[in-house]
Image (cartoon, rainbow, N blue to C red):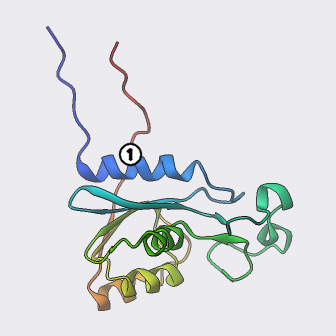
Amino acid sequence: MKQSQKRPDWDEYFLKMAYLVAERSTCLRHHVGAVIVRDRHILTTGYNGAASGVKDCLKLGCLRNQKNIPSGEKHEICRAIHAEQNAIIQAGLHGIDISGSTIYCTHSPCILCAKMLVNAKLKKFVAAASYADKTFKELFNEAGVDYKAVKPPRLQIKKLS
């Protein structure tokens, strides 16, 4: 008799994908991944890393570590583009409307990403870990973006023999 298997709910499913996307990160501090979804269909993904075609922190080292800058402060002193920003950029590059969608992200957003997400008209943000910058909460509340913090998903791929 086959043992019944618990399927992940949609939040867990898309968050697991965000963690997989984060594996492409070139940041030495945080590996962050984002997946933008509408009607249970993936629209775009993004991870944090240097601009396309330029040297990243894996090659050059981390400017923020070298200058002892705490997480969540002075975002401009960083080579990386945040995962949420890259997911929005991918939508623009490929002509994909992301308004009304949900973003699943390994971490909660910084205020800069939150502003971009509000202007991109995303309706929901689901995060599994908390980033140091908490200033996004007031903006999301005012703009009507639903924020949902969930437990990190169990990161295991179930393989049937």
Q: Position of residue 136 (x, y in %)?
A: 44, 82
- Please tell me which residue is depicted at 62% across the width and 55% down the height of the picture: 25
Label 1 sits on residue: 153
- Residue 44 screen position, x and y as percent: 41, 62
Q: At x 45% / y 86%, what residue is drawn?
A: 115
5 in relation to 130, above or below: above
Counting the numbered discs, the total is 1
Q: Residue at x 32, y 77 (%)?
A: 122
Query: Is residue 51 positioned above or below 106 on the image?
Result: below
Is residue 135 in view from this perspective? yes
The N terminus, quarter of image = top left
Looking at the image, residue 150 sits to the left or right of residue 130; the answer is left
Query: Which quarter of the figure has residue 132?
Result: bottom right
141 vs 93, nearest the viewer: 93
Which quadrant of the rendered structure holds the C terminus?
top left
Query: Residue at the bottom extreme?
Result: 142
**143 horizontally vs 152: left or right:** left
- The residue at the point 30 percent across, 89 percent down is 143
Q: Is 20 in front, or is 73?
A: 20
- Does 70 appear above or below 155? below
Image spot of residue 77 (x, y percent) = 74, 80
Quarter of the image for residue 159 reads top left
- Amino acid type of the residue that numbered disc 1 sits on in the rendered structure: Pro
* Residue sitting farthest toward the left: 1
- Give how far across and how far down residue 87 sits, in percent: 47, 67
Q: Which one is in front, 95 or 156?
A: 95
Label 1: how many residues lie within 10 Å, few (<14), some (14-19) or many (20+)?
some
Q: Secondary structure at mark 1?
A: loop
State whether residue 105 appears in this view: no
